[in-house]
Image (tube, rainbow, N blue to C red):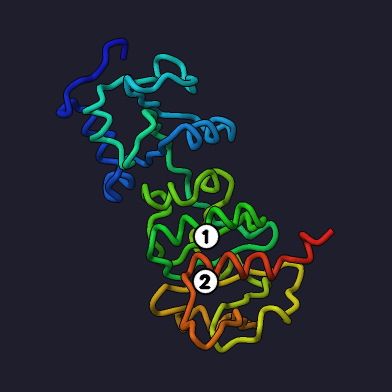
Amino acid sequence: WSVMITSRQDDFVKYAASLKDKKFRRERGEYLIEGVKQVREAAAAGLEFVRVILSPAYAGERFAPSEKTVEVSESVFAKISQEAAPQGILAILPVPEMLREPPRGRCLLLDGVSDPGNMGAIIRTANAAGYEDIYLRGCTDPYAPKCVRSAMSGIFFVRLHEYEEALLAGVEKIVADMRGENVLSFHAPQKFCLVIGNEGNGVSGEIRAVCGHTVSIPMRDSCESLNAGVSAGILMYELAKEHFVK
């Protein structure tokens, strides 16, 4: 691509823009990331870019060789971008294959998490708090643009798995529920799986049946509930606090 693409009807432009849709992400096995920080951190993580897309407004560092760099007009970039104030750089990455392996340490099971913003926030916090393995059961697509944006670089550093009960055999499971034991007085085992349920319906009966512990976050009477991403973040740190106290 030595010539700038200026047509919004160009085949490459249609292909790149299609990756905002779950159907085409699945068909092509690729997803979009956007902004200097995300592209830089993907490069730092050693991920290989399919393409890096630049607008005329972008004058920063280059993250891919010329044969993988595509320059497009501002109008074309706007068709692909989902940002209100785009930074002029996007990248296409291959979707990693979902794993089916036992956890290396403490981990998460997300049971029906449906909001991409919550999914992204949970992935971001999981990376920060050292929950490297995340098992997904009936969840939203973790590579949706809103999820990737919310997850920041966390999406590059966690291991996403298709949930199978056999993978978590022998691992203590702790489910979050408002009727559970106060998490502030709960002592978690060294290796465990924290289970987070659907935003509206909570954890399914099937998953609840295999959980040995139930914990809750204490709240004032005037507060009915917390956002799933916020709840997950509090629980992740509280349950693993002994690993962070020096």
CA neighbours of label 1 inside 10 A, class few (<14), some (14 to 19), many (20+)? many
Are discs 1 and 2 less than 8 Å apart at CB? yes
Image position, residue 234 (x, y; %): 61, 68
First in sequence: mark 1 vs mark 2: 1
Quadrant of the image occupied by residue 179:
bottom right
Please, which residue is most extreme toward the top here?
2
Q: In this view, does 48 lie to the left or right of 138?
A: right
Q: Which amino acid does label 2 sit on?
A: Ile
Q: Which residue occupies the foreground of this view, 128 or 144?
A: 128
Image position, residue 217 (x, y; %): 60, 79
Q: Which residue occupies the foreground of this view, 229 or 17?
A: 229
Look at the image and tell me in which quarter the N terminus lies: top left
At 41% across and 49% down in the image, what residue appears?
143
Q: Which residue occupies the foreground of this view, 142 or 27?
A: 142
Q: From what the image shows, is residue 122 above or below residue 192? A: above
At 67% across and 79% down in the image, what residue appears?
183
Q: Say the numbered circle drawn on residue 75.
A: none
Identify the secondary structure beneath mark 2.
strand
Look at the image and tell me in which quarter the C terminus lies: bottom right
At 58% across and 57% down in the image, what residue appears?
125
Pointer 2 residue: 196
CA neighbours of label 2 inside 10 A, class few (<14), some (14 to 19), many (20+)? many
At 53% across and 55% down in the image, what residue appears?
123
Q: Say the numbered circle drawn on residue 122.
A: 1
Image position, residue 6 (x, y; %): 20, 20
Q: Is residue 205 left or right of residue 190?
A: left
